[in-house]
Image: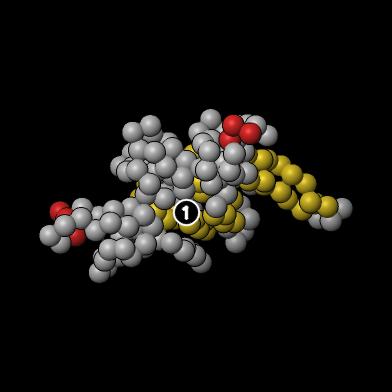
Amino acid sequence: FSTNFEDSGRVYVMYRNAATNQWIQSFSMDGSNNPLATIGGELGTSVAISQTSEWVAWGAPDQTAYPQFPKSGTAYVMHRAGQSPTMLSRVDSETDMGFGESIAVEGEWLAVGAPRKDMSSQESGQPSDLLNSGAVYMYRYQNNQWVHHSTLRAPLPTSPAWFGTNLRMSG
């Protein structure tokens, strides 16, 4: 582990061998094998496992996916079969939006929270932008890829609301 990636975070994916009752590491990610690792990127801040254990997902809310948007955040999702994780980020990023601060996965659905996402005055109908109003990005697994489905915002947005700070899905 390189000290150049101090506080970048680390994630371990493990499974239990039912026959031996042993936990076995199947994957790990940290600053040494993550091309987007940044100091203070907070990889692994949020972690979710689907109820069927088919999917595992994790966030890095302060990673920089796009140089023009520092600390915009990323999320990763990996299938149980042991394939490499898929990285998700937002093209509509903004600096310090916290994409990946919370995460939930169930069946073919993935929710990624961005509680520091701002809402423009055009979106909210308010006279000024709503800072840290938050958003939740919904993805659906279709045709072997995660596709952005919709973006959820607070029904009555305020500033700050931090909508999307905590997520949970069921069923």
User: Could you tell me the amino acid type at mark 1?
Assistant: Glu
Q: Is residue 20 above or below residue 72?
A: below
Q: Is residue 109 left or right of residue 117?
A: right
Horizontal and vertical percent for residue 29? 62, 39
| Residue at 30% from the left image edge and 60% from the top image edge | 133
| Image-quadrant location for residue 26 | top right
Horizontal and vertical percent for residue 27? 68, 40
| Residue at 41% from the left image edge and 50% from the top image edge | 98
Q: Residues within 10 Å of mark 1 (few under 14, many from 20)?
A: many
| Residue at 24% from the left image edge and 58% from the top image edge | 130
- Judging depth in this view, the residue of 110 and 59 nearest the camera is 59
Q: How many marks?
A: 1
Q: Is residue 5 left or right of residue 18?
A: left
Residue 37 visible? yes
Q: Is residue 83 above or below residue 126?
A: above
Horizontal and vertical percent for residue 170? 51, 66
Residue 88 visible? no
Q: Is residue 156 above or below residue 14?
A: below
Element class at badge 1: loop
Of all residues, the one furthest to the right in this rendering is: 20
Of all residues, the one furthest to the bottom in this rendering is: 156
Image colouring = secondary structure
| Image-quadrant location for residue 85 | top right
Where is the N terminus found, in terms of image quarters? top right
Q: Which residue is mark 1?
A: 101
Horizontal and vertical percent for residue 9? 59, 44
